[in-house]
Image (cartoon, coloured by chain):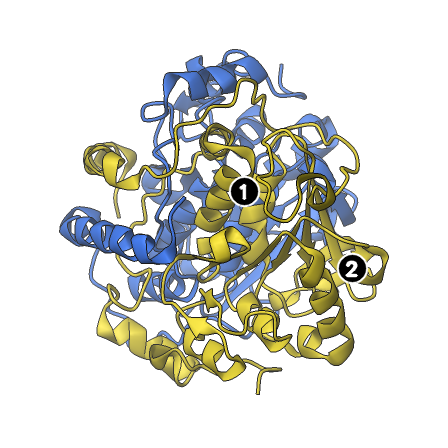
Chain colours: A yellow, B blue
Amino acid sequence: MTDSSDNSAFEKQLTTSGRSRRDVLKFGSIATLGAVLGGGALLGRATPALAQAGSEGTLAPNDPLNILIVNYDGGTLLDFAGPSEIFHRLPNTNVRYASLDGGNVTLEFGVVYGKTERLADIDETDVLLVPGGSDLTAPMRPAYQAQIRRLAESARHVTSVCNGSLVLAATGVLKGKRSACHWAFVNKLAEYGAIPVPDRFVEDDNGRFMSGGGVTAGIDFALRVAAKLRGQQAAEFTQLAIEYDPAPPFHSGHPRDARPEVVAMVDKKLPGASRGLARVPGVR
Amino acid sequence: MTDSSDNSAFEKQLTTSGRSRRDVLKFGSIATLGAVLGGGALLGRATPALAQAGSEGTLAPNDPLNILIVNYDGGTLLDFAGPSEIFHRLPNTNVRYASLDGGNVTLEFGVVYGKTERLADIDETDVLLVPGGSDLTAPMRPAYQAQIRRLAESARHVTSVCNGSLVLAATGVLKGKRSACHWAFVNKLAEYGAIPVPDRFVEDDNGRFMSGGGVTAGIDFALRVAAKLRGQQAAEFTQLAIEYDPAPPFHSGHPRDARPEVVAMVDKKLPGASRGLARVPGVR
């Protein structure tokens, strides 16, 4: 393979390449926060900011912010582990986890995620985040869909990662809205009246709807959400804290770059994937 | 911010840039696997492959592979969520989770990770992975250290992500070995006789020791481990499945690139960070 001295040269080239991309990568305004202290301590239950700021008002970076991540059996850990790690480090932000029945959920591969609250016990949230999964049977059931719909209606920002957008779309809240999704499922959004966009991050209605692509896209998604809601400097602080300086060893992160035989492997496992129409249990 | 049409142009530029990096990024041999089917089903408890392949032998990509991820209160979810997502998708690979007492562990920010096995119940493992945390008090205690040392001695590959390398180093198994660590803590490795290397991935003793940098580096680390142990094609399949096509919105993933005021924010929160000497509870 490569030892770390090769690796060092390798990272240097990446860095050089990265630097030249800096102007391309920058977006949004330069941070103007006077006092972003960044992450760490939870500040207790913040009050939902919607009522305070008004539906058109901009949420100030120091207003309390509630983020709710919904969980269900069959979900994918990394879809929300990236956002979780970023959101917990933002100032004056409270991150909660909930599932239909509360308690432990059993994610994809039998991974157990513990101590979620009950969805019915959450009155409202500023940000609703629906992660995806390999089996969407649970969140596609009517009782779960009703909770998502209820929370989405009052949330300031309705968001998803990976094929969590199919769960949102099935509730009807994405009708006519542009949305991202994992590349293998993205075109199924149209079956629910949403507009599929094959990008890593998609925003509609001036940020009321924000979505990320598949699995690891949740990290890029969450940094953008962080910048929008807590200011660019807080987002940059978080990126540095989690050392998000990616250096993938292969160029295989998207079908447009992967070797055809590797795309074929995914198609074999998930028929229809390369047309964005792979089936997932629970989705019609 | 940017809407997704801007985003589209933005991603295109990234892709172009990414393509030109392809030759730089490639490493190792072209995959020669005849039948990598990739991910999905767990195949039950695989037998540790060490005895089968011999200490110098190369593990064939179809030999069963056991990976053990150790957990503890105060650990960081994303340090192991990336590797978990990758390792579970590899062929003929069994991923287990264990902590000193078994059961639920309470990670950083109060995140609960459930149903771990007891370390004492694990006889041996092919790959030992120690993730990092914001509080290393638990894994630095003698009883936990004894379990890590025992498992490391018989493991084919002794690995870590983030400041999990400090936990390994404290057991003595990294004496004279090159190791990665989160940038804020990397130079503390020297206090335990290990050799700090400020890279995203570090390998020593021909892969017996492999380590990743901070938090998100676990994804790059795991793809390299996957390629080494299950073949490049299986690693590329996994990268495609988790859509690992990173597009960080800011250039702030490492102190060499971040704005000085952002590095200063981390230094304020973690004094000594920019010298690689930040303190972490539990570490002398």
Q: In the image, are marks 2 and 1 on the same chain?
A: no
Asked which quadrant contains residue B209, the reply is top left
Asked which quadrant contains residue B151, the reply is top right
Up-down: is A217 above or below B265? Answer: below
Amino acid tagged 1? Asp
Residue at 41 percent across and 85 percent down: it is A271
Up-down: is B261 above or below B153? Answer: above
Tell me the residue that label 1 is attached to. Answer: B79
Q: Residue B11 or B107: which is nearer the viewer?
A: B11
Q: Residue A143 or B112: which is nearer the viewer?
A: A143
State the image coordinates of residue B183 (x, y, percent, origin top left): 43, 25
State the image coordinates of residue A179 (x, y, percent, origin top left): 46, 65
**Along the horizontal axis of the image, is B153 left or right of A276?**
right
Residue at 42 percent across and 17 percent down: it is B261
Q: Chain of mark 1?
A: B
Q: Residue B15 or B49: which is nearer the viewer?
A: B15
Residue at 50 percent across and 11 percent down: it is B272
The residue most toward the bottom is A284
Up-down: is A116 above or below A193? Answer: above
Q: CA distance from mark 2 to mark 1?
A: 21 Å
Assign a secondary structure to mark 2.
Answer: strand
**Along the horizontal axis of the image, is B173 left or right of A51?**
left
Q: Which mark is residue A104?
A: 2
Amino acid tagged 2? Asn
Residue at 60 percent across and 70 percent down: it is A173
**Label 2 environment density (alpha carbons within 10 Å; few <14, some 14–19, many ≥20):** many
